[in-house]
Image (cartoon, grey):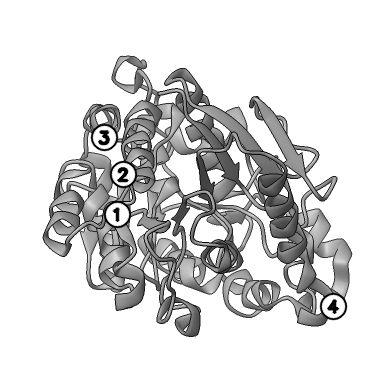
Amino acid sequence: MGLTVLMNAGPWLAVPPPGYGGIENVIATLVPELRRQDVRVVLASVGTSTLPAEERISVFPDGQFANLQRPYNQVSGVAQAHQHGVIRALRRRDDIDLVHDHVEAVGLATLAAMHPTDVPALHTLHWDLAKHPELYGTIDGGDRVRVNGVSASQLARAPRALRDHSVGHVHLATPLAVGADRRAPVAKDDYAVILGRITPGKGQDTGARLARQAGVPLILAGPVGPYHRPADLAAAGDEARQNPDVRFWYDKVAPHVDGDLVRWVGTVAGRERDDLVARARATLFPLRWEEPGGTAVVESLALGTPVVATSRGCLPELIDTGRTGLLTDDEEELADLLVAAELLDEAECRRAAVQRFTPAIMAARYVALYEHVRRGAQVPEPAVAATAATAG
């Protein structure tokens, strides 16, 4: 290929992140595979990032994630300062063939505002596209700026202006999928796990209530706001309640957490996270929102653990119900499905991950999109729909 891509990870977390960090984990998965396919990568992130790349650009020495819940007038310049650093770097050099941007809203707006003859860009949409309607409903990047989704269902809910800039979707991947079908089976324990940031859209309160109803032990693994460990949250005191996720924890989730049947273990990463998921009878996703990408879903399959979830967002695209998981439109049915999940075969889950969710598959799809964006070709709507149907 011989491409040089500026990979814009943003200012919030290091790449790879020390624990939670969905977008940063995706980038940490994608970049090594791109480099194996002869793509040079200039990584725009924070100074503590350790991901190997040909070059790095940073404005902030460390991740700014903890600032996200501060008042707007205190945090509004963070993403803009990072983006300004990216633009300055682009203006100093002429060897960047394409920008691959992952910074919510600000990234797309900045790229669209650049001169029509500037470097082409692909902006990946990782989040709920119902947000930012004034931006997404009017965006105009011309032929130079394109977007991709992380599922077909996500793009189907996008405003027309955003879909007009779409080149299709790319399902997320996990390094855990590499050789997953050759991995020795793991002895299953009796518990289920919900992995991810504790927030209303993920539905941990519903999951905890239903697990207690089913008598299935449940482990909640993920941060509450900026607090990664129970001890950190306890030490923060009442002031922490200014964070909406912390209020959700105390008001809705904590009443179900007894330290026995339902436990919160905080953020887990690396081998600890993999062991926790691999030994679970199921991963539970009692979603209240239209999940766009499902990183934790593909990780669960790669580790041989079936998924039990509400049938929302990308879940029907990722799960072969009855084979790799159990989906329902009725959240009250999740309690029964948690019990039924032990009948599913972990080998089927791992085989599906190998066939669909390896980093090499994701990287090859992105390389094809890079070439498409560089050519500046407009994709007619039927072609976008066909791509969505066949890409994963």
Residue at screen point 77% across, 50% down: 63
The structure residue drawn at horizontal position 86% and vertical position 77%, both measured from the top left corner, is: 239
Q: Which residue is mark 2?
A: 372
User: Which residue type does callout 1 highlight?
Assistant: Val
Helix, strand or loop status at disc 3: helix
Snapshot quadrant of residue 162: bottom left
Say what amino acid the circle numbered 4 marks.
Asp
Instruction: Point out the tag, 4 or 3, that comes first from the N-terminus.
Output: 4
Q: Residues within 10 Å of mark 3 (few under 14, many from 20)?
A: some
- Where does the image place residue 196, in percent across and percent down from the top left? 54, 54
Does the CB distance between marks 1 and 3 fall below 8 Å? no
Q: Earlier in the sequence, mark 1 or mark 3?
A: 1
Q: Earlier in the sequence, mark 3 or mark 2?
A: 3
Q: Is residue 50 above or below residue 105?
A: above
- Location of residue 254 by image quarter: bottom right
Image check: 262 left or right of 142? right
Measure how far apart labels 4 and 1 are at the Cα level: 46 Å
Looking at the image, do the residues carrying marks 2 and 1 touch, with CB atoms under 8 Å apart? yes
Q: Which residue is mark 3?
A: 356
Q: Pointer 1: residues within 10 angstroms few (<14), some, or many (20+)?
A: many
